[in-house]
Amino acid sequence: MRASVQGRKFDTSKEGLDMALKAAGNVIPDSSAYEYRAVQVEPKMVRKDPEDPNSEQFQKQKDGTPVWSIDCIRVDRASGNKAIVTVTVPDVMEPDVAGPVEFSEMIAGFWVSRSGSGMWFSASAVASL
């Protein structure tokens, strides 16, 4: 079955919808294409009970290692365009970083929900340059 919106035709068959909803998967960003400048580091928080805003606690990996959110300014080296991104990094202690940083084994992925979509970034470690 096909649907049309403003002259564009869309495949609304089960196969067509399944293709449209499949995740793009994770990608490894080209580290030579971007420069990262750390702005702040905070513990990554999660809610134990999604309905209770007072149930926030530190997010930890399965082995108990805390996860940290590092807010960065990402600069495209070719164009100079800037974006604010948050990269999550596991570490026993709060990473002591500010200014230019380098991430090890960074991956990026896409998330989709009923309220929107976006990208997430994660790395195994971070170091100041």
Image (cartoon, rainbow, N blue to C red):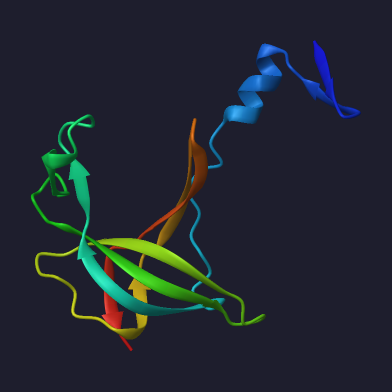
Vertical order, 30 against 10 (above or below) = below
For this orientation, the residue located farthest to the front is: 53
| Residue at (21% x, 44% y) in the render | 46
Q: How far across and how far down the image is residue 42, in percent?
A: 21, 65
For this orientation, the residue located farthest to the bottom is: 129
| Residue at (39% x, 73% y) in the render | 72
In the displayed structure image, the side of residue 19 where residue 66 appears, left or right: left
Quarter of the N terminus within the rendering: top right
In the displayed structure image, the side of residue 94 where residue 17 appears, left or right: right
For this orientation, the residue located farthest to the right is: 7
Q: How far across and how far down the image is residue 39, in percent?
A: 33, 77
Vertical order, 93 against 128 (above or below) = above
Q: In the depicted view, which residue is nearer to us: 100 or 114?
A: 114
Q: How far across and how far down the image is residue 125, in percent?
A: 26, 69
Quarter of the C terminus within the rendering: bottom left
Q: In the depicted view, which residue is nearer to us: 19 or 51?
A: 51
In the displayed structure image, the side of residue 89 where residue 28 appears, left or right: right
Q: Quadrant of residue 100?
A: bottom left
Q: How far across and how far down the image is residue 4, in percent?
A: 85, 21
Vertical order, 102 against 13 (above or below) = below
Vertical order, 16 against 26 (above or below) = above
